[in-house]
Each structure stands twice: as C-alpha cells, then as structure tokens.
Image: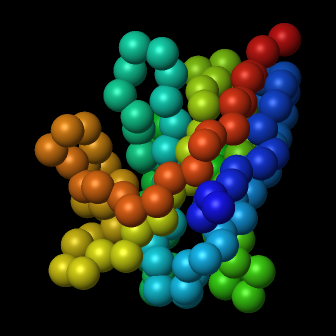
Amino acid sequence: QEQLVESGGGLVQPGGSLRLSCAVSELDFHYYAIGWFRQVPGKEREGISCMSREETTYYDDSVKGRFTISRDNAKNTAYLQMDNLKPEDSAVYYCAAAFPLFATTIETMCTMTGPEGYKWDYWGQGTPVTVST
C-alpha cells in the first residue's frame, strides 16, 4: 500500500558510490515532482536533490557535483546516484513525491523544510546510508 519504497542504501567506504532507487506506485508518476531528502538524529530533514516533472533539477551545495538525480517515468522509478561519498553523507535517505497545484519552484520545494516549509504529498520509509571505514 506504500506509494514510495526506497532501496539501495547500505554501508559504503568513503569515496565509494551507491545508487538509491525509489519505486513509485499508485501515482501518475509523470505529473509528480520528486525529491531526495536525508536526516540525521537531532537535525532537520534536509532536501538534497529534487526534480520537477519537467525535469528541472536542484542540488544542495553539499552534494552538487557528487550526486545525480534522475527519473524513469516508464518504470515509475526515481534514482539518486551518489558518488564520492563522505562520512557526513551518512543519514537516512527518503524519497518524496509532490503534485504542486500552484506555481512553486523546485528549489523552493526542496529547500523550504521544517514546520512552515513545503509539504510533500508522499514519503517513503527511508533507507539508511552509512559511509564509514
């Protein structure tokens, strides 16, 4: 019954790579924006990369040049390719989907987190990523 299910997390050494997948069901995926977020204990959930339905992308500076977001609408799947992983990338990673009804930029959707931030419609359960020796 879950609309979004993440996979691909795990333990990786610094400098290594992982690809996270987000399988989407029961949604007309083509019309939804997607986002990847991460959260560590004691910190707010952080939007790290998001993509509009037009495939405009946003990357947080902390992952720019290392992570790549993509989507395959035919497979109803979103991806996050993570390269050159660092220990500070360790977190639980979540995918999210949203159907914005008003003109909202993907940057706003991805960065305006917290109680007053943008409310994504659907969330996965999260997949842990640990970057450690």
The image shows residue 45 at horizontal and vertical percentages of: 40, 34
Whether 81 is drawn above or below 114: the answer is below
Residue extending furthest left? 116
Residue at x 15% of width, y 44% of height: 116
Q: Residue at x 29, y 55 (%)?
A: 119
Q: Looking at the rendering, in which quadrant would you find the N terminus?
A: bottom right
Q: Is residue 64 visible?
A: no
Question: Which quarter shows the C terminus?
Answer: top right
From where the camera sits, is residue 121 visible? yes
Residue at x-position 40% and y-position 68%: 98
Which residue corresponds to the image point at 66% horizontal and 19% vertical from the top-left?
87
Residue in the foreground of this view, choosing between 26 and 42: 26
19 relative to 89 in the view: left or right? right
Q: How is the image coloured?
A: rainbow
Residue 83 locus on image (x, y percent): 74, 44
Name the quadrant containing residue 24.
bottom right
Q: Position of residue 77 (x, y in %)?
A: 71, 71
Left or right, 133 with respect to 80, comes to right
Residue 20 vs 11, above or below: the answer is below
Q: How many marks?
A: 0
Q: Nearer the viewer, residue 96 or 108?
A: 96
- Residue 52, position as x, y percentages in the image: 44, 75
